[in-house]
Amino acid sequence: MASKASSGEDGTPRGREKRSAARLAALQALYQLEITGISANDVIDEFIAHRFGPDPETGPGNAHDEVFFADIVHGVLKHQVEIDRSLAGALAAGWTLTRIDSILRALLRCAAYELVGRSDVPVKVVIDEYVELARDFFDGTEPGFVNAVLDRLAHGKRAAEFGEAPPDDKLRL
């Protein structure tokens, strides 16, 4: 797990923007992995070499937090079975992950990884960031769906942040 210092999170608006951009890229990379079957390292290298460039507003320097991006992608892939089980438990009765759109599935997996594998990121930030990403991709009820699933998952995985006793839960990264 990456630390705040190694991930570039410095609490500044610029640091938050880099993390937001990294989340979007991780979602896109996971979607690409699912669709193409290309290796994770090849996709990560492609994103860093060809898709992460200088910020158009600030010039030289990267607009993405590359370490955070790679951590999300590798973390999701390493713990995908556990993440998928947790997400399946947070879905409404009758819903399965396979029934969910592939972009939405990638988004939920990224968020779930952050909830269980990145305790340095507050629950509220995780939920807000991924609901906003859902709004960027979908015009319908999907952002509300993302909010509900992540809220349910967060209460189970990070109960202490809500002032609740943690449940007996198996997924800890």
Image (cartoon, grey):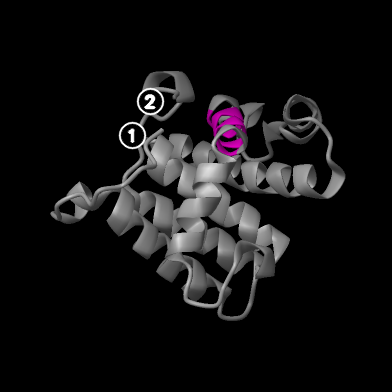
Q: Position of residue 154 (x, y in %)?
A: 34, 55
Q: Is residue 81 above or below residue 66?
A: below
Which amino acid, mark 1?
Answer: Asp
Q: Is residue 17 left or right of residue 31?
A: left
Would you say residue 20 is visible in this rendering?
A: no
- Residue 170 sits in which quadrant? top left
Q: Residue 164 shows which numbered tag?
A: none
Residue 37 on image: x %, y %: 83, 40
Residue at the (31%, 47%) spot, across then down = 169
Residue picked out by circle 2 = 4
Residue nearer the viewer, 52 or 80: 80
Magenta includes 8? no
Q: Earlier in the sequence, mark 2 or mark 1?
A: 2
- Crowding at dot 2, Cα within 10 Å, few <14 / some 14-19 / many 20+, comes out as some
Q: Secondary structure at mark 1?
A: loop
Image coords of residue 156 (percent x, y): 30, 55
Q: Residue at x 19, y 56 (%)?
A: 162
Q: Choose between 126 and 39: the one closer to the eye.
A: 39
Provide the residue designation for mark 1.
Answer: 120
Give yes or no for residue 69 being in the magenta stretch.
yes
Camera sees residue 128? yes
Range shown magenta: 68-76
Q: Are marks 2 and 1 in contact (CB under 8 Å)?
A: yes
Q: Main secondary structure of the magenta part?
A: helix
Q: Between residues 32 and 15, which one lies in front from this camera angle? A: 32
| Residue at the farthest top position | 6
